[in-house]
Amino acid sequence: MQKYLKKIRVLVAVLFFAAVIVSFSDVKGNLPSSIQNSALYLQFVPSALKFFTPGTVLSVGFIVVILMTFLGGRIYCSTICPLGIWQDIVIFFRRKFGPKQRLRFKKALNFLRYSILVLTILFIAFNSVLLLNLLDPYAIFGRMATHLYQPVLLFVNDLLYHIPFLGLHNMEYSPFSLIGFIFAAGMLFLVTYMAGTGGRLYCNSVCPVGTFLGWLSKYSFFKIKIAQSSCTQCGKCQAVCKANCIDIKNMEVDETRCISCYDCMPVCEVSSIGYNKHKMKPVQVAKPGTKPLKIKKGLERRLFITAIAGLAASKALALPKKAAEKITNEKEKKDPFYDRGPVAPPGVGSIRHLIDRCVACHLCVSACPTKVLQPSFLDYGLSGIDVPQMDYDAYFCNFDCHKCGEVCPTGAIIELPQEEKHLTQLGQVYLQIEYCIVESEGTACGSCSEHCPTQAVKMVPYKNTGLTAPEINPDICIGCGACEYACPATDPHKAIFVVANKEHKLAENPKEEKLEYEETDEFPF
């Protein structure tokens, strides 16, 4: 039965990988959010973050993964994790078309991987998901899919759009994000190179999720072991082990690095490797001169020192943004446009909540129909690097849309009822009339008022010139950015713009204007 486990694993992995790809292929935001949520339900980090986020639908996907790990090891890493499956694809093509070089057993880089895990846990304890943002395998793959795969998809669609019988719809390209591209391309190169040269090296040396699940695998009920009484030490299992966890010389399997890919089982001609119950012990073969691998003395002390360093770093990241603002150019500080702050998407409640929960997988960026959501750089500070923000140069937030809240897998953006979304105030409108083209060029406009969904911007007579100029009511503004996007002024910047609310508020309901008319029995036309 165990010899079929690899085929089952490959089939399940293909299904999960396809589901994730489909989720990130929804360029127009038309895919039902229920399908996307189901595809990402078992992603470990997003599920864990969403589980501990108040106001979200309870997500227990990470608990399912933990139970799977206690049962049979790191099944998540080989069948569910999209970055892990990508590495398997790279390894497959390397073996198929690359040099015929066998992978060899390597000692675990315990200090490196456990240090990264300890640092990650410390950062989380001090309300910073910075390391998860950078190292979580799902988030890394999400950025790759959004900023590398999606442009390719759009390019192919553009080529095939002109073939009539295919019935494809024309799709506009998303705004190019340099920071998103750099992060995605950099990690694609790094992970692909590590997979092509060392197998699942990223999973077993860097990834905090892999290290944590590997630690849990030490206590799994079923473990992959070598029956030393029947093993011929032919080395075939070690040659195909992509995790470098099989030591054929000592007939041992490092369960903390084994990813339960089952590649070793079909190649063993004497069926000496496979799952055994945790308490079963194989017959030991004495091998003089060999010693079991142990963690070096002093490792715990070094990890503790590293943890203290991480504590200090996380404290530094928690410094208020005002410390960074002190280095802002004094000229810019006098102009509210340069000190308005990043506008967070509706449903986050506060910028602090967004930074504490978002791992920058960019699924919201991918699914946003208007592409107003774009990756930030240091707008939120170092701890919020690459976290999405509203970019009103790209577009504005549709009044009736809340796709980002529907698809967010971590609970960083909570789905709002439409009535609440209509009143959620991301920021308030600010007008600098001296930059408005009505004042600077003496030209009629009104674009900002025409696009405002709440009429927080109205046109009123201006200086007896026969022109009308915008007048704002910040109390009913929701900060959707429609006025800023539509404003044609560019010198030195937009005349009307949104100043961000660090904590989102509820705007007042616009007052309905009553039309004055006289009642009459006569038919109106």
Image (cartoon, rainbow, N blue to C red):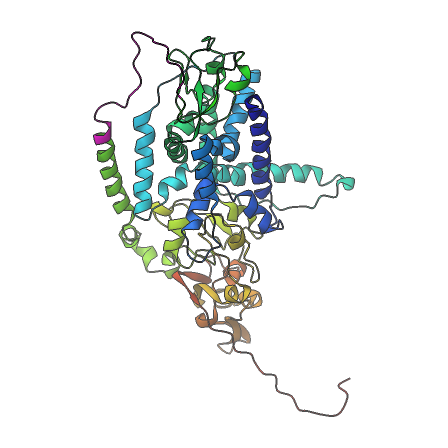
Q: Residue at x 61, y 38 (%)?
A: 153
Magenta segment range? 281-301
Residue 137 rendering spot, x and y as whole percentages: 45, 36
Q: Nearer the viewer, residue 158 or 251?
A: 251
Assign the N terminus to one quadrant of the image.
top right
The image position of residue 402, as x and y in percent, is 54, 57
Is residue 150 in view from this perspective? no
Q: Is residue 173 magenta?
A: no
Main SS category, magenta section: loop
Q: On the image, which quarter does residue 516 sit in? A: bottom right
Q: Is residue 160 visible?
A: yes
- Residue at 47% x, 73% y is 508
Residue 294 belongs to magenta span: yes
Q: Is residue 133 above or below residue 351?
A: above
Foreground: 292 or 337? 292
Q: Residue at x 56, y 29 (%)?
A: 9
Depicted 431 relative to depicted 203: above or below: below
The answer to whether residue 500 is above or below residue 103 is below
In what quadrant of the picture does the C terminus appear? bottom right
Question: In the visual, does 407 lie left or right of 353?
Answer: right
Taking depth in this image into account, of 343 and 43 the one nearest to the observer is 43
| Image location of residue 355, percent across then percent down | 38, 50
Whether 376 is drawn above or below 78: the answer is below
Q: How many marks?
A: 0
Toward the viewer: 466 or 24? 24
